[in-house]
Image (tube, grey):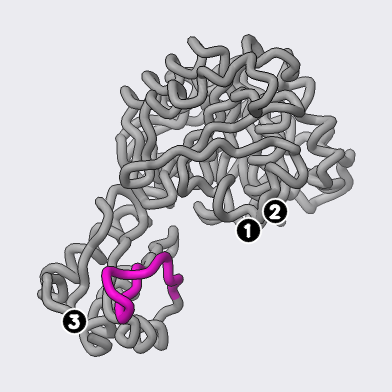
Amino acid sequence: MAAIVAANDGAAVSYGDDPVSARLQARAAEVFGEQARIFPVLNGTGANVISLMAAAPRWGGVIASDVAHVHTDENGAPERVGGLKILAVPSVEGRIGPDAVDRYAGDIGNVHRAQPAVLSLTQVTELGTVYSVADLKLLADTAHAAGLRVHVDGSRLANAAATLGVGLREITTDVGADIVSLGAAKNGGMLGEAIVVLSDGGGAAGASADLGEAVPYLRKATMQLASKTRFVSAQLLALLGEPGTPTSGADAGAPLWLRNAAHSNAMAARLRSGIEAAELTGDQPGAVRITCPTEANVVFATLPRAAADRARAHARFYDWAPGETADRVEVRWMCAWDTTETDVDGFVQALGRAL
């Protein structure tokens, strides 16, 4: 918010031709590599749709997990707006493997099938799990060998980097990602995300040969170009840090993206350990059952529906899926950049009362 106020001092050129956006571009080159080009947009769905449209031809398909946000939670935007078919593959704890590419590679050249053009990976996954650096590299190499580009839906990319103890470059540029939807709103930002183009080479026939050239036009055509881009850029710059500052670190001098993400991850770990320490988990019908590894800033669990509704009176949370029986439900407990220890401990107590 302070960065937005600072960006509001005086006049500035519109549509991203302003000094704040110029500093953001310089910072993106430091964080992701000198070839990186960053394009602020208004929201995550827009970032995903533009990225996929730039990376695939009009007749293309996007390989993604069966729980991917682009498949389940964007109201068909990649299909409706981008004209791209999502080729969903079964995931294990939210993650997919190289066999996801192999599953559709045989369709290349078949006029009756949507042509696989992009592998889209969500980091952190929709189930709160994290791809390792080695897994990302293997997936990207497999996709590139088949002639596909690699997109990373990084709405919680910062949380993944914090979990793995690496910088943002190590899980994007260095593993072979071509284009990234970089999240800000889920890491403390008020409004806005970004598309980061990392590579221009390769890709399916008919796709844009230059992602960085395609994105500006697609951004305008899909109504994601803000006239006062500097206010989105200011937030991204506050998260990434000004040009010339360290790009990673674990102490108080670490960039804001890392401090916020590490804190939200720690609060999720505290929530899970608190639930277990309070002996609220177990196999009995009235207990909490943790359903996914807690690797970032979310805890997934099942519990009685009635107890979930009572706990929701203390803090709002989503029902995620049906539970093991009709009277149980799987829920998602998210921790944010500003979740406090008191918030977590209070919820554990409320959950105990609800159960």
Disc 1: CA contacts within 10 A as few (<14), some (14-19) or many (>=20): some
Residue 116 % position (x, y): 59, 24
Q: Residue at x 30, y 60 (%)?
A: 268
Q: Which mark is residue 4?
A: 2
**C-alpha span from label 2 to label 3:** 48 Å
**C-alpha span from label 1 to label 3:** 39 Å
Q: Which residue is mark 3?
A: 286
Instruction: Say what secondary structure mark 1 lies in.
Output: loop
Looking at the picture, does residue 297 appear above or below residue 350?
above
The first of marks 2 and 3 along the sequence is 2
Query: Along the horizontal axis of the image, is 132 left or right of 253?
Result: left
**C-alpha span from label 2 to label 1:** 10 Å
Q: Quadrant of the N terminus?
A: bottom right
The first of marks 1 and 3 along the sequence is 1
Query: Along the horizontal axis of the image, is 239 left or right of 329?
Result: right
The first of marks 2 and 1 along the sequence is 2
Residue range (magenta): 317-330
> Of the residues tagged 2 and 1, which is closer to the observer?
1
Residue 200 % position (x, y): 66, 14
Q: Amino acid at mark 2?
A: Ile
**Labels 2 and 3 touching (C-beta < 8 A):** no
Looking at the picture, does residue 319 appear above or below residue 78?
below
Q: Quadrant of the C terminus?
A: bottom left
Quarter of image, res 289: bottom left
Q: Which mark is residue 208?
A: none
Q: Which residue is mark 1?
A: 190
Q: Amino acid at mark 1?
A: Met
